Image (cartoon, rainbow, N blue to C red):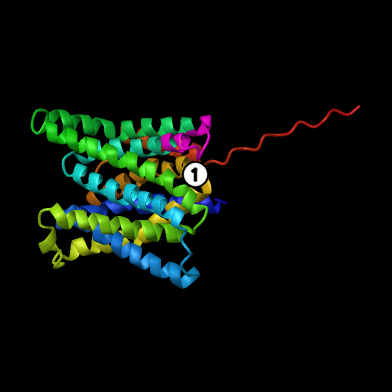
Amino acid sequence: MPSRTTLLFLVLCVIWGTTWIGIKAGVEAVPPLLFAGTRFIAAGVLLLGFTTWREGLPRLAWRDLPRLAATSLLMITLCYAALFWGVAHVDSGTAAVLEMSLTPIALMAFALGLREESFDRRRFGALVLGVVGLAILFGPTALRNWSVTAGDGAGLRLAGAAAVSWAAVVYGWGSVVARPLLRLYSSTFVAASTTLFGGLLLLGLSLAGEPGAIPALAGQWGAAAWAGWLFLVLFGSLIGYTIYMTLLREIGATRAGTYAFVSPIIAVLLGMVCLGEQIHLLDMLGMAVMLAGAGLAMAEPKPKSQLKPATN
């Protein structure tokens, strides 16, 4: 029977593999930063209320405030501001390859650099498998789309690709920075605080300079955008982000980050079911390699057998 950790990991993969539906519905009608900021603020308020009702608000030590602020800034504000802007200027295949491959790489790099984890050959092998699978699944489409439009706004596309890459890096950095907080406070409290503070900063950025942000505050977004917003608040943030924080605390950033090898498979399968998209043999190969990488990372290492002393 799967362990609790494995079940949480699978739930996270399914949730974050379906959030693209809500994001796509929202950003087509609402300025992206406003859409993201209001989503995180709503999720943060709800989570903070739930945390207060269930366990009461913890006494937050002053020395932990800088780390909490850094986590909010990295994982929410800087990540999603760059991600949403970058996705608007590169094709989805390129964005998928960059973000989903760089996120677990950044998680491992920062976990090792900040001494939150030690090097593990098995996890490194899982990372290599996952990145290779992502390249097989999304690489051909990304290269084809990039070459077809070569010379037409290439500079802006490069900037968009750089923004998506930056989003993956700061998300990995923030995840590792957050882990010491998760040893002191509950995952729901850390999730609530970071989403609320990060969302407020996103909203401030949107209102300060995003075209169309102030008129969009009237809320005339349309049914599809509001449905996407509610889905992202309830599932993407309230449930998904809290589960991710729990996994960060329990299994570390490197293993938790391998959701990036499973969520794209969920998205591809949903595209096949909902949009009639075709899956080819090469796609299936890429998905199989990605699943192998995630499975290797999540598998519990076997305890080393102890040699029994010889008896005469």
Question: Where residue 306 sits: x, y (%)?
Answer: 73, 33
Q: Which residue is drawn at the image coordinates 33% and 47% (left, top)?
A: 74
Q: Can residue 36 be seen in this view?
A: no
Task: Determine which residue is flagged by label 1.
Answer: 252
Q: Is 55 in front, or is 67?
A: 67
Q: Which residue lies furthest to the right in this view?
A: 312
What amino acid type is highlighted by mark number 1? Gly
Badge 1 element: loop
Please state the total of marks drawn on the protein image: 1
Pick the residue in front: 18 or 42. 42
Q: Where is residue 223 in the image (x, y as percent from the top left)?
A: 18, 65
Q: Which residue is drawn at 37% across and 61% down?
A: 238
Quadrant where the image shows the C terminus: top right
Report x, y in % for residue 278. Answer: 25, 41
Query: Could you say which quadrant of the image residue 300 lies in?
Result: top right
Residue extending farthest to the front is: 62
Q: Image check: 272 left or right of 114?
A: left
Would residue 195 be visible to someone looking at this image? yes
Q: Residue at x 37, y 30 (%)?
A: 132
Q: Nearer the viewer, residue 21 or 98?
A: 98
Residue range corresponding to the magenta coloring: 109-123
Q: In the rendered structure, does residue 112 fall within the stretch colored magenta? A: yes
The quarter of the displayed image where residue 283 is located: top left
Image vertical order of residue 217 relative to residue 173, above or below: below
Q: Residue furthest bottom?
A: 53
Horizontally, residue 311 falls left or right of residue 92, namely: right
- Which x, y percent locates residue 64? 45, 54
Q: How crowded is mark 1: few (under 14 residues within 10 Å), some or many (20 or more)?
A: many
